[in-house]
Amino acid sequence: MTMQISLGANQYYWPKSTIEQFYRDIADSSVQRVYLGEAVCSKRKELRLTDWLAIAKELIQAGKQVRLSTLALIEAPQELDMIMPYLEQQDLVVEANDIAVVQLAKERQLPFVAGSALNIYNMSALKRMLDAGMVSWVMPVELSRDWLKGVLDEAQAEGVRDRFDVEVLGYGHLPLAFSARCFTARSLDRPKDQCKKCCIDYPDGRLVKNLEDKPMFVLNGIQTQSGYCYDLSNDIASMQGLVDWFRISPQSDNMKAIIDHISTQLTEPLHQPLAPDHCNGYWWSVAGKELVAENSY
């Protein structure tokens, strides 16, 4: 399978009109697979499932493969109730980012995507997911090329490699952690239950710098992201034969240029200087914030 581009679920909180226009633009892009839905905070309700399904219909008509993403941290029965309709619709495969959704999908014998937040690190865990109905695996963002190759070699040896495809986050701020606390609200001296949905004021999260004035983290509600942007656009040659889908994480600006750049790199790889606030360390088994200039494969 030739590597293709997927667009992960939007991690940020945008107004409804902004979201709808964003995906109208994506319909005309070279992205082949699109994930829709809220994956971070259950308070973000600009769009409901019916709205997401309407966007999905337009994207499918444009030739895109569409999947629905779910919350990465389920904390209450009410949040499970929110997710149930995602599993009850019969047309779109769901991305499970919490093990509770895996269990619900398994009980209903539904195929699902195993999101990176599930922390699947070895063949034993991978086989459990396959037995539950997994059809796609999004590798945990902190794992390396060598780790991925080792797991896939085991999958090949056990005769299960053809039962799932592999996605790797190749561009975007890395989702590092989720917490019951809302750090965006906390940074504004607001309690979580009185946050006033302040995330909507930060369309790409709230950047936190260290004492040396360098990016450290991006606060995104209950999610903490890397301060540097993860960028594997120069490492595509090393992904061939291992990765089926190069995942891009949505951002508010320059999305078309980013997609076009990755699309070009897939067909005509060309090593180009990356911005100083970009990184690719995890892929090369070094500190995540590092930028490995060049590796040949």
Image: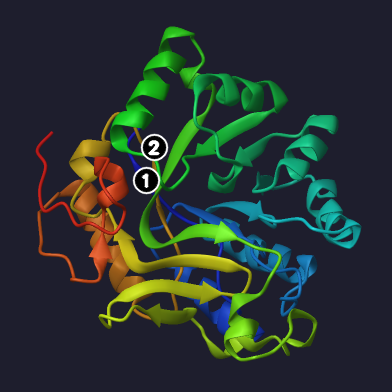
Please tell me which residue lies in front, 48 or 44.
Answer: 44
Q: Is residue 58 left or right of residue 213?
A: right
Q: Is residue 260 left or right of residue 128?
A: left
Q: Residue at x 73, y 71 (%)?
A: 51
| Residue 249 in the image: above or below residue 195 | above
Q: Amino acid at mark 2?
A: Asp
Please tell me which residue lies in front, 213 or 92.
Answer: 213
Please tell me which residue lies in front, 190 or 2.
Answer: 190
| Residue 284 in the image: above or below residue 29 | above
* Residue 268 x/y as whole percent: 14, 49
Which residue corresponds to mark 1?
Answer: 4
- Label count reads 2
Q: Quadrant of residue 28?
A: bottom left
Q: Quadrant of residue 233?
A: bottom left
Tell me the CA gap for discs 2 and 1.
6 Å
Circles 2, 1 touching at the beta carbon (< 8 Å): yes
Q: Amino acid at mark 1?
A: Gln
* Residue 196 x/y as whole percent: 73, 90
Callout 2 secondary element: loop
The quarter in which the N terminus is drawn is top left
Crowd class of label 1 (few under 14; some 14 to 19; many from 20; radius 10 Å):
some
Q: Residue at x 76, y 44 (%)?
A: 101
Please tell me which residue lies in front, 30 or 39.
Answer: 39
Which residue corresponds to mark 2?
Answer: 244
* Residue 50 x/y as whole percent: 79, 67
Q: Residue at x 60, y 76 (%)?
A: 183
Q: Is residue 246 left or right of residue 272?
A: right
Q: Residue at x 39, y 37 (%)?
A: 244
Of the numbered discs 2 and 1, the one sitting upstream in the chain is 1
